[in-house]
Image (spheres, coloured by chain):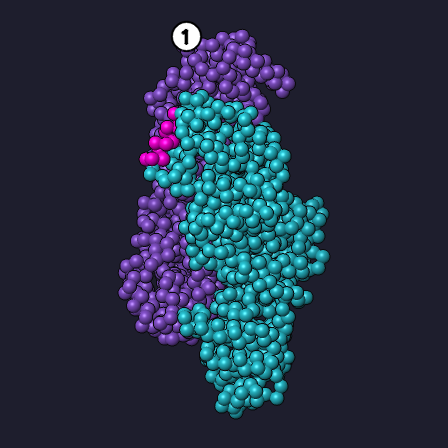
Chain colours: A purple, B cyan
């Protein structure tokens, strides 16, 4: 008779012997230390069944249902006799995690004969399955209650992600699981439970009694703390945890997967936000590898700097000297009379490392290395990466790249980039900062903004991040007064906590962060032995981190800068009531649908508003929302202005969405001006969806852009942006 | 003791007395007639509880659990004594549909005392609730089984929509319900069950026994037939229907909502497809109201016809005569020497009706009425609508409109429209036919296609559909050899069955139909007293109809013509394995994610393919899928061609997706040509997402368009289109 957890009292045992005033497991240093010592006996990566998991976690005082091992049918019957009610027999083995599926659980046994028979069946099954060292245990049958799923899965980047759900099919078939990165408070846990689709079941659904989740939420928070304190356990399932009618929690099963290798925690390097001004707002720039050939990066960077009117000194550096791009070149960096703030190094990979070393020697505050051929290209490149890292480590020099298309600051008229986007379009300052892990994608997305008359404040592609990484840029830009929104094209980060810290900085400075996250497939999926593991991929951790930090994920790459611009340049509405004003009934009703699908409301126009419509719309016109002024209405000068001024002045309207169809040419410009006239400070935010081809209404669309009004093509994207604007607004 | 259904035998009664060989309810004419007679006793719109619903439906032999009314506690105990096992007591009233919520159900009563006590409690509760004429019934407690939801809701347009799901929370909280328009076969029902998220539970989930749904599927089909036969019943819930372990079905509850008014069925006007050639391919056209002022519709239509080279005679009709738009005008239609095929009537509403009458008198085969001011504009307009309808009824004349922007046939060089879209862009024939219930939206969407170099074959906006409606156009275009895809901007149809017939025609002729459906909000929601009603709005019926017909709904308006073009102009792949070839690692991995999310597979390249890469890509390049040729690769002439030819020739690749970033100017044209060279007959379908602003790569994008290759901006839209192409392909 082996005791695996709570001792059996001589006077019988029921679930009541579990501490019903359970507050939190023993997460004290001593208990944790005992568990960690015990864990050293197991192979990393092992999956542990109920018996082993319980035994290991015993010092923590988790509210497990009592359990006793029986070595024979008689012993099982004897244990059952001591217990006051029906019992459960389970055959436990680390080789079988899903016991019920394997027929290794016998429920609701009352008589000694039933217990003996069940023991016999389980013993036979363990033999049939060829299990080594199975244990057959007797447990009291728990009272009826609500079964919950609770577990964690350890993400390589962000550490443990806690999962909660209701047990059974809601978790398994409907994937109704909520996630949060640890640590989390009991209040956080309550919010998590509230976010489940099955939350109404807990709140007292259709006359059922509400489930008292107070203790469960405390348990969730405590499990989050344990996950942080026990890095050796990769995944843990407590499934189910039964919440009894009085709120007491009872863990009926447990399984753990040990980490295959030490958790990544040790590799974290939190650091204070760096001042990136030498990189983004340099007073002077040297272009090392400056070339007369504008097909080469060294030629393109120089041309971009000059074309966009960089206000400081530009020093081409070229071993041949002479004049490059209309400027006198020096033959080497050391030949410069002054040390430039920024060195743009447009050389091949190996030569770039040499140049960085020279920059460090000369005390250049910042450098950009454009070359590829580093870590991304194979073993040789990785060696160069290390050399580059070594060259800057401890130097205090800021390094962007390698393998970057560069840095642009419109506010500073500085385009230290070889991107084609700035060949054709001028820089246009705005509050948007773009930080991208793909230069090609960033350049493409930026080109749309510039082509359409929207600005980009700063724009940096991080490249291989040999030194400066996404978190550094986020922290820096979040701290600038000129930043109104950060757009992030994100593949992944190496240092999760530092990234979280950067997002926290942005939240503190109230700079919204919009994210397009890629890398779902590339991340791959490890083989999973736990439910938790199957329910949470790497994307889950990113989503949980972004959500907690209030960052917004967009589902379409080409929506990234669109949404960022809207959030950075449009005042937040105070409510969720949207007016739709359109030149087409069909487009208007479609947009009203899309608005409704976004959890926004279709505003009701007030009497004064309707009266204002009467002056400019025909008597038979439908003056409801969505309001169709018709194409004829739009062609009559002043109609749209009058209507939009009335709608914008309606106290029942929080957001105005204008949907235009085939308003083209000169009409497009006039209509755009009327819209712009009706928008502005003190008015509700106004968004426009203009469905016609840009080629037919280019000037009108550009006028709106220059007046600070976003023009969407697709109404669904406008509706989604309106919802993001109104995210914090009450009903 | 009132018998509400099956008689109680003297020898006891259990669920076994229900016909366990149940095949189908009695849907014979006599049983139906009895039910319909009984229904006349009830007010239309009434919600009926279990007792009344069962009594009404009794002639149909639905597999209800037996039920007996008890007028006293003693009588209840006596009935229970006759039954062989535990019983259920329910208090029934038409005033309470959700009995359990109201505490009016007492389960699992075994002893006479329990039954008496339960009776007392129910009687007290009915008094407390103030129910008039409640009935307390005794029913045998059904054996354990699987509870299903089964019901119908009657859609105004399409008639009864049958709903199935698993009982309880999967239906209520997760909305896991499948819908099909009646009639449906037992096989259809099995497919519906298979489409549920909870289907694995029925199929034998995690060691549970599979549920034998054979009888349930027959019941579903029979219920669909009943729904068609009983138009007086708007909604019916059989909730739950319990499937016993042997497959027997037992309806444990029922509630019905009677139709508020006679069902729409009688208003249906099926008709054979009409030959619309006089309207879409006329040999001669008269423009009535032709004007010299091209700001007016009569001027615009005339100009459009001439500008796009209409090959037949064009006759301006203007009371002033003289020359209009360079053509001699006649003063009236009757002054023409010949009867034109098509009259384009560009006059105000009332004058248009007059003109239509004259067309009918003269035997003009087809007319378009552009004017608004008809039914859409109020009571006066509705009167004109009726006049218009009366004028054409029985005449055999085809009428498009009123309130339409017209008809365009690129194949016939006929642009009988005042849309701005054809002012700037030339017509370009293609297999796409656009049928739209909004002229403004259609014009806008078409303008994108024409601006980007894609063609539109025919294009009609249906206007108020005084005569010809969406179904007529779908049927007609589906029958033309030149049609490869129909794109439908759909608000709603008046005649559901005729619309279904038109979709069926398109399925028969293998013309894909792509639909953007609007009108969710406008449709409103009727107050619902049934579960079914709450679970199925008008959109549900449209979705069920479109799905059954194989039509494809797109979620974004601006995707409608994009997807239609792809489906109409791209060969179907034989499998689902996608190769991603990109100039940017970041864009490539993002696209691979999007492909994976679409239930497509990332292809594995064969050895020969990898060997071909080796000739043009650096040795360190990652030659996996997604394949990043890098921007440098794309700048090297021939690289992309070589890579794409290898990928297209790989037997493991079914679809090729190319993702381009900042390839601009001359490079854009060269790269586009290389892509076009690698595509073509016998090669896998190839789609392109080109992320950079069109302004920077216009010529390259146009080259691809003219070579029959679709260029998307957003990779997610490309991935979605690829999935639609591969919809019928096996893995």
Residue lying at 57% horizontally and 79% vertically, measured from the top left: B360
Residue at point 45%, 10% (across, down): A82
* Whole-percent x, y for residue A23 in the image: 34, 24
User: For mark 1, what is the residue?
Assistant: A10
Which residues are the magenta region?
B117-128
Q: Position of residue B450 (x, y in %)?
A: 56, 69
User: Disc 1: which chain?
Assistant: A
The correct choice, above or below, for A564 with respect to A534 in the image is below
Q: Secondary structure at mark 1?
A: loop
- Residue B226 included in the magenta stretch of the image: no
For residue B205, above or below residue B496: above
> What kind of secondary structure does the magenta stretch mostly adopt?
helix
Front residue (pair B537, B704): B537
Q: Position of residue A398 (x, y in %)?
A: 41, 47
When asked about the image quadrant of residue B392, the answer is bottom right
Q: Is residue B122 magenta?
A: yes
Question: In this view of the protein, which residue sits in the foreground, A321 or B446?
Answer: B446
- Please indicate whether residue B216 sits to the left or right of residue A400 in the image: right
Q: Quadrant of residue A104?
A: top right
Could you say which is closer to the camera, residue A393 or residue A198? A198
- The crowd level at tag 1 (other Cα within 10 Å; few <14, some 14-19, many 20+) is few
**Is residue A338 in sight in this rendering?**
no
């Amino acid at each position: 008779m082996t005791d695996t957890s709570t001792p059996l009292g001589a006077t019988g045992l029921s679930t009541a012997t579990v501490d019903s005033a359970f507050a939190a497991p023993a997460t004290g240093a001593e208990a944790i230390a005992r568990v960690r010592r015990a864990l050293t006996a197991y192979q990393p990566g092992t999956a542990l069944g109920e018996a082993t998991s319980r035994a290991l976690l015993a010092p923590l005082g988790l509210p497990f249902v009592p359990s006793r091992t029986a070595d024979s049918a008689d012993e099982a019957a004897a244990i059952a006799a001591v217990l006051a009610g029906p019992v459960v027999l389970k055959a436990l083995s680390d080789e079988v995690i899903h016991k019920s599926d394997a027929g290794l659980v016998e429920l609701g046994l009352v008589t000694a004969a039933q217990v003996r028979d069940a023991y016999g069946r389980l013993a036979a099954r363990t033999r049939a399955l060829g299990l080594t060292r199975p244990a057959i245990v007797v447990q009291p049958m728990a009272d009826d209650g609500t079964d919950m799923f609770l577990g964690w899965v350890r993400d390589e980047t962000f550490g443990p992600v806690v999962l909660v759900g209701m047990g059974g099919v809601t978790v398994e078939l409907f994937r109704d699981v909520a996630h949060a990165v640890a640590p989390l408070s009991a209040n956080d846990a309550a919010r998590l439970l509230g976010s489940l689709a099955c939350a109404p079941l807990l709140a007292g659904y259709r006359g059922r009694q509400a489930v008292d989740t107070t203790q469960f939420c405390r348990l969730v928070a405590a499990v989050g703390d344990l996950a942080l304190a026990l890095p050796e356990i990769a995944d843990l399932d407590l499934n189910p945890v039964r919440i009894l009618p009085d709120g007491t929690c009872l863990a009926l099963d447990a399984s753990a997967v040990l980490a295959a290798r030490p958790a990544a925690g040790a590799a974290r390097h939190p650091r204070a936000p760096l001042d990136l001004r030498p990189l983004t707002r340099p007073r002077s720039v040297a272009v090392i590898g400056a070339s007369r050939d504008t097909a080469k990066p060294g030629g393109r960077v120089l041309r971009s700097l000059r074309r966009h009117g960089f206000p400081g000194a530009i020093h081409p550096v070229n071993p041949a000297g002479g004049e490059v791009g209309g400027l006198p070149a020096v033959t080497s960096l050391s030949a410069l009379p002054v040390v430039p703030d920024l060195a743009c190094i447009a050389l091949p990979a190996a030569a770039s490392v040499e140049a960085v070393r020279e920059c460090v020697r000369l005390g250049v505050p910042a450098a950009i290395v454009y070359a590829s051929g580093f870590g991304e290209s194979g073993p040789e490149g990785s060696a160069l990466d290390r050399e580059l890292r070594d060259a800057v480590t401890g130097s205090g020099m800021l390094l962007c790249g390698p393998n970057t298309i560069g840095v642009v600051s419109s506010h500073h008229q500085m385009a230290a980039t070889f991107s084609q986007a700035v060949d054709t379009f001028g820089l246009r300052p705005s509050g948007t900062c773009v930080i991208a892990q793909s230069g090609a994608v960033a350049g493409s997305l930026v080109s749309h903004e510039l082509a359409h008359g929207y600005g980009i404040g700063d724009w940096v592609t991080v490249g291989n991040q040999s030194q400066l990484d996404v978190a550094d840029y986020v922290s820096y830009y979040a701290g600038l007064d000129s930043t109104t929104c950060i757009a992030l094209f994100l593949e992944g980060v190496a240092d999760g906590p530092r990234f979280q810290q950067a997002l926290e900085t942005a939240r503190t400075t109230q700079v919204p962060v919009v994210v397009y996250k890629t890398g779902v497939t590339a991340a791959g999926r490890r083989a999973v032995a736990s439910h938790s593991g199957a329910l949470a991929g790497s994307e889950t951790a990113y989503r949980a981190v972004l959500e907690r930090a209030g960052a917004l994920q967009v589902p379409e790459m080409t929506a990234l800068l669109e949404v960022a611009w809207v959030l950075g340049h449009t005042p937040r509405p105070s409510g969720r009531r949207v007016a739709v004003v359109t030149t087409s009934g069909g487009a208007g009703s479609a947009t009203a649908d899309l608005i409704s699908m976004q959890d926004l409301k279709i505003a009701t126009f007030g009497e004064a508003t309707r009266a204002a419509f009467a002056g400019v719309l025909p008597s038979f016109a439908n003056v409801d929302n969505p309001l169709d002024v018709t194409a004829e209405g739009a062609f009559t000068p002043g109609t749209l202005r009058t209507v939009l001024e009335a709608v914008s002045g309606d106290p029942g309207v929080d957001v105005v969405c204008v949907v235009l169809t085939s308003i083209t040419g000169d009409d497009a410009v006039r209509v755009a001006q009327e819209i712009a006239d009706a928008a502005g400070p003190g008015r509700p935010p106004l968004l426009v969806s203009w469905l016609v081809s840009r080629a037919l209404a280019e000037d009108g669309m550009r006028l709106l852009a220059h007046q600070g009004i976003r023009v969407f093509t697709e109404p669904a994207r406008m509706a989604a942006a309106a919802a993001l604007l109104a995210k914090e607004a009450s009903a």
